[in-house]
Amino acid sequence: MTHLLLSITVTTIAALAWGLLLGGISRMVTARIHGRIGPRLTQNYIDLWKLFRKKSSIHHGTMFWLAPMFRIAGGAGVLLLVPLIVGNTVIVNMSFSGDLLLVVYFMFFGCLGMALGAGDSGHPYAVIAVSRGLAQMSSYELSFSAVILVLAAGLKTLSIEEIVMAQQDGILSWNLFRYPFATVAALITFLPMQMAYPFSIVLAPQEIPIGPPTEYSSRLLSFMFSGRALFGVAKLVLFVNLFFGGASGWVSLLIKTFLLYMFPIFVSSVFPRFRTEQSIRFLWFVPTSLAAIDLLRIMI
Amino acid sequence: MEKQPQRIVSDSGFEIEVVRKDEGYFHVRVSRANVIELILSAKQRCGKNILQLISVVDRIEDDIFQLTWILEDTADSSVFIVSADYPRENCSVPTFGDIWPTAVIFERELHEMYGIEFPGNPRQYEDFLLEGWKELPPMRRDFDTLEYSIRTYGERRKRIHTDPRKFIAETTGEWDTPVPMKDEDR
Amino acid sequence: MYCNKLPEIPDDRKKIWEKVDNMARANSLWVTAFGTGCGAIELRPLHTSRFDMERFGIAMRPTPRQADVLIISGYLAVKTLKRVIRVYEQIQDPKYIIALGSCTMNGGMYYDSYNTLNILDRYIPVDVYVNGCMPRPEAIIDGFSLLMKKIKEGKAEGWKNYIENLEYYRENQKKVISNWDLPDYNW
Ligand code: SF4
């Protein structure tokens, strides 16, 4: 029991630190793409500390306070249910006790809590953003379930552990090469999950200034930030496990998550934003049909 | 429909002074009794369908406000300009708010800035730019802005010296270039 | 729905934390995107690759709730002062104000205008003035580095000043804003 608690704490803290560092790197990379120097590597830690120590005197109702906790809980939940390293017996957390569907449920749990909190804040922009976000979520949820269907039909299992184990004989056994179309579809749905640019209709900095967290300040915002970082890492680990053969060690985990994290950043810095209905239409049809191709291949 | 307002001018039974005439530009001055008739006939007979602006000049020397209506035809961007003089005291001008809704806003602004009344304009006493202004309307020339500014916002802080060299020399003690500089030093 | 409580100054018991906090605050200044007067146009180049203020950790925030710094970028009309007070009081403590241009110091070229304030720090507490008409982006960055220095030394205490002398500021504000309809404090 102590071992489990210890492992959970260590995983969460490490994931938080790694997520913030990735965030810092992403800001630097974006700046370099713009031709700027960009912030320091540690900027995100500094921001977080400053926000954490700022005074807060705003109250908008219970959900307003709970939403950041929901977000952190959602992120941590996903992280703890996913095996980090193949065959590692020291840090297993709870990866044996949940399958892919539970993880997906946790992923949407965090967003839902966020939506309730933002709605409670009563700011019109936050409400617009929430309605957009939920519409978009329902659309990429569809494509992502199609991808899960491909994996389940192909590997005859929903347990992440077994999906990872099935990818262990060489690089060609990765799901990336077994189900290339489904992988592309999953990567497309990864963009809106990370609020990357063509699909960033929720934050939409120039239209509805930063959307849901408009009323959040100080400490609550810092929780929101850490929740987001945690969530980011959890999703990265999940994707590495599902399509890129899992990680055989800490180094390979870091490298794989890092490379995967760079993907939305590069896409993000060269694309403009879709309108809401464009984004939803794209997410309904393109990734879903890509996943359907692979599904047909399995069936035939 | 004829495009040029000449006909209106020659048809009208009252005196019209043509200030300037040009291609697509026609500026006339009339007495204030005939303003409404002239503007309405310009709208109906030669398609000046847009009221671009109502402007006021405060000619305090002659004790008048000179009002100018600028009308435009959107089809060929020709403008027709009508000017008329009104007395400064208790100035009251007809409103065009029911013909052009923009006029309501222009007239609100003029009421606030010059104190001109537009009887019949439903919104003329609403605040436009100034919120809760209680003094003389600020754009009238008998309003002393400097005096008002000092009274309300306080005297501005001034530097004691106006010569920057002397000022820098006194504060930092660094300006020791001889003034004026000799030619070979430049 | 307003909160009627007036703000309080937090007690500075945790002196050691205060040093670390000040370092963090100085290196992560978030600015409310709010422009008054001519100067807002000189803030835009700060984002670009030429001046790049993100390398100092300065970022723009679209909402006052998340910001630390309010920039008064030029002359302030009475009508805008009302909005500035609202925005300033919605920023969470600690908060700082940078004022740009000669208009904010002594009225500048609008010293005799019927509608612009002459001396800004009678109405809100200013931490750093940057002079010029309009200050170039370099000068604004210089102003930021001065503010950072002040924060690190723990001297940027305009917000405490505001809370302590709220009555004085309110009196001055009410003197120029003739249709005062704000609550006691805009949380
Ligand atoms: S100081 Fe100059 S540039 Fe700045 S607001 Fe005043 S007039 Fe405009």
Image (cartoon, rainbow, N blue to C red):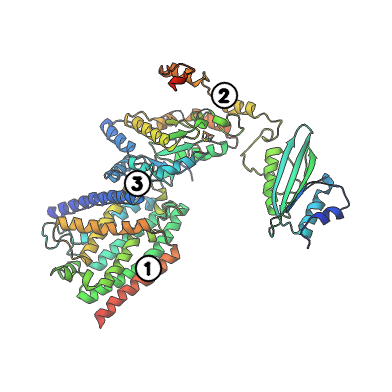
What residue type is disc 1 on?
A: Leu
Disc 2: which residue: B155
Q: Which residue is mark 1?
A: A283
| Label 1 vs label 3, nearer the camera | 3
Identify whether A22 is placed above or below A173: above
Q: Position of residue C86 (x, y in %)?
A: 49, 40
State the residue position of label 3: A36
Q: Does label 1 or label 3 sit earlier along the sequence?
A: 3
Return the x and y of residue B29 as percentages of the image width and height: 80, 45
* Mark 2 and mark 1 on one chain: no
For the residue with label 2, is its CB less than 8 Å from the closest atom of ligand 1? no
Give the residue drawn at x 77%, y 45%: B83
Labelled pair 3, 2 in contact (Cβ < 8 Å): no
Of residues A232 and B56, which is closer to you in this image? B56
Q: Residue at x 15, y 55 (%)?
A: A251
B133 sits left or right of A30 in the view:
right
Q: Height in image: B148 above or below A294?
A: above
Q: Position of residue C122 (x, y in %)?
A: 50, 28
Q: Chain of mark 3?
A: A
Residue farthest to the right? B13
The span from disc 2 to disc 1 (Cα, nearest Å) is 63 Å
Label 2: few (<14), some or many (≥20) within 10 Å? some
Residue that appears at 57% across and 25% down: B154
Residue C22: image x %, image y %?
31, 34
- Report the side of A131 relative to A290 (left or right): right
The answer as to whether callout 3 falls within 8 Å of ligand 1 is: no
